[in-house]
């Protein structure tokens, strides 16, 4: 069973849901009516956090699960937690100013790449 990875997955999905709610709130705050996605830089930064999270999920989730299956549930979940923390840092930084998004992006990128590399290693080594 992969209980820790399941929890990390649920937390990642909840974080994505939270970013969706933030976009809805920002639409009201800044008067951006759907389907518009531009018109106010503050709204656009909130929107980009949600979209960037969505763009990373197809890389993150399979890597997370393959790492858990082929290497370790606990380590996958720990790296998943680091990825989520990176996304939170990214959210806080980017919503304040575009120039402040780098640290969070770096943290989540490293966690995601470690998950992918571990998953790749685990799959290939199991085939040999």
Image: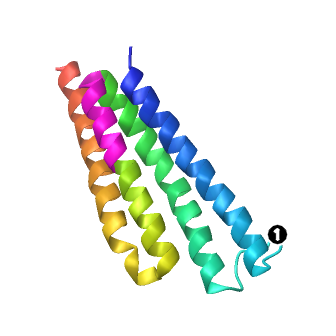
> Where residue 52 sits: x, y (%)?
51, 62
> Where residue 89 sits: x, y (%)?
39, 63
Instruction: Give the residue at the far top of this rendering.
Output: 1
Mark 1: which secondary structure?
loop
For residue 90, above or below residue 81: below
Q: Is residue 40 left or right of residue 28?
A: left
> Does the magenta-highlighted stretch encompass residue 28?
no
Q: Which residues are magenta?
A: 70-82
Q: Residues within 10 Å of mark 1 (few under 14, many from 20)?
A: few
Q: Which part of the image, by quadrant, shows the C terminus? A: top left
Residue at point 70% right, 71% down? 26
Residue at point 35% right, 30% down? 66
> Where residue 84 sits: x, y (%)?
41, 49
Main SS, magenta residues: helix
> Where residue 98 sits: x, y (%)?
46, 81
Residue at point 45% right, 30% down? 7
For residue 71, above or below residue 18: above
Residue that numbered label 1 is attached to:
34
Residue at point 61% right, 85% down? 41
Q: Is residue 24 left or right of residue 15?
A: right
Q: Is residue 17 left or right of residue 112?
A: right
For residue 124, above or below residue 116: above
Name the residue nearer the viewer: 54 or 119.
Answer: 54
For residue 103, above or below residue 71: below
């Amino acid at each position: 069973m992969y209980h820790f990875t399941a929890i990390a997955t649920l937390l990642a999905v909840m974080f994505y849901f939270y970013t969706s709610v933030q976009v809805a709130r920002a639409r009201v705050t800044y008067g951006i009516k759907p389907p518009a996605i531009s018109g106010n830089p503050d709204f656009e930064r909130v929107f980009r956090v949600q979209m960037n999270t969505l763009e990373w999920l197809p890389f993150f989730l399979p890597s997370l699960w393959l790492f858990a299956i082929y290497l370790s549930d606990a380590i996958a979940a720990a790296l998943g937690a680091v990825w989520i923390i990176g996304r939170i840092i990214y959210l806080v930084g980017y919503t304040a100013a575009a120039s402040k998004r780098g640290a969070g992006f770096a943290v989540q990128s490293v966690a995601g790449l470690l998950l992918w590399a571990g998953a790749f290693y685990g799959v290939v080594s199991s085939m040999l």
